[in-house]
Image (tube, coloured by chain):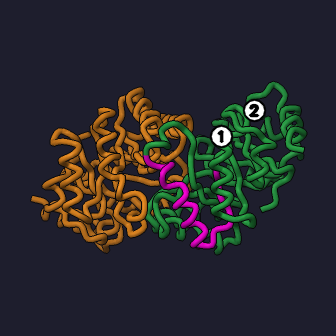
Chain colours: A green, B orange
Amino acid sequence: MKIKNNLILAMDIMELQKAEKVCETIGNQIDTIKIGYPLTLAEGIKTIKIFKENYNYQIICDYKVADIPATNSKIAEQTFKNGADGIITHGFVGEDSVKACQDKADEYNKDLFLLTEMSHPGAKRFLQKDADEIAKMGVEMGIKNYVAPATRINRLKEIREIVGKDSFIISPGVGKQGGEAKKTLEYANAIIVGRSIYESENPKKATEDIIKSTK
Amino acid sequence: MKIKNNLILAMDIMELQKAEKVCETIGNQIDTIKIGYPLTLAEGIKTIKIFKENYNYQIICDYKVADIPATNSKIAEQTFKNGADGIITHGFVGEDSVKACQDKADEYNKDLFLLTEMSHPGAKRFLQKDADEIAKMGVEMGIKNYVAPATRINRLKEIREIVGKDSFIISPGVGKQGGEAKKTLEYANAIIVGRSIYESENPKKATEDIIKSTK
């Protein structure tokens, strides 16, 4: 996936109208947004098409898919059928579940992103100890796209070492959660920023400032 | 949660119209259904209200919620606001993420179900080794409702021992996946059956037969 200015906007807003206002303000400084289940549940999966048609954005659906293979396949089917360009799936549910999403991504010629790790405090107890193995599983499976957090830069570096220089890493946690944009882009291909943009009084300037800070 | 005939129908159908036809056929032999993201994405979250209003069913949303606390909270908010009686959340994302759903369930006076384990082949690599610890975390957190699979009865028994006799366990995997209804109900409070009912030529009779087999 090519991502303009290496910046993805995490549109973690529950109302489509507010989200669209942010899009209108930012304009074409970005070309990719990430949406999750909160907005999808609140406004319906039609939101994907609305962002695509009205703003010409690429859409990554951060659904952190984590079910059995048959259900993962149905979730990915719905997601791609409704226009998504990428889907984020959890790795801890295992290879068969991830492969179900990978197969759907291949069928639609779209992108699967494997989530290797999370950085909220609760992730320490179970998820973090498996992060390297999840990344290795992705490499074994031929997965090219990964999600790894910007909040602990050493971990991001380690994940990059596992998935290799040709893999594509997108990295959330820049901004309010403490990750630094420029530093993160040493190891990630694109940063994901949410509140620092959409909670800003001037989302256009906030976006410009973030882009400048990465140069 | 009280569940009629200790039987939950897993409505893993992608079209609301087909799902409603199954409901009409089965009638009041059951009072609880489980829906997932495939149907919700295909038909919108309004499906919850439709099942409740048209058939007076309790709805458990099997969204296997697995995000950071702030996002889990928003997902649970949307789910309960739209009428769900219960939500299923993953445990491996850690205590804070689960607590975000638990707090929303408490706020709406509805039920949180903690998923401790899955039984598809891929679950062996990461998830199964943490299953007991996830169940123990649930007990520490005062969670009363659990999801544990019927396909490996010894494991179900072990999860029951961890969560205690007063906890409420619902158990998927009965029927096409191999779990036995009566045996499962020795350790679980309710079984979850999908394809054996909705793929049956006579869903009403299939439901009756399952209920009989549990007596």
Tell me where residue A87 sits by quadrant.
Answer: bottom right
Q: Look at mark 2 in the image and give the residue it sits on.
A: A196
* Quadrant including the C terminus of chain B: bottom left
Residue A40 percent across, percent down from the top left: 61, 46
Give yes or no for residue A137 being in the magenta stretch: yes
Query: Which residue is drawn at the image coordinates 40% and 48% (left, top)?
Result: B51
Residue at 26% across / 65% down in the picture? Answer: B151
Gap between marks 1 and 2 measured at Cα: 15 Å
> What amino acid is found at the position of numbered circle 2 in the picture?
Ser
Q: Quick one: B195 or B89, which is closer to the camera?
A: B89
Q: In the rendering, at what x and y percent does residue B183 appear? A: 14, 62
Q: Quick check: A100 left or right of B126?
A: right
The residue type indicated by label 1 comes to Thr
Mark 2, other Cα within 10 Å: few <14 / some 14–19 / many ≥20:
some
Q: Is-magenta flag for residue B80?
A: no
Task: Name which of mark 1 and mark 2 comes first in the sequence.
Answer: 1
Q: Which type of secondary structure does the marked residue at label 1 adopt?
A: loop
Label 2, secondary structure: give it. helix
Res. B204 in view: no
Estimate the x, y position of residue B77 in percent, counting from the top left.
Answer: 50, 34
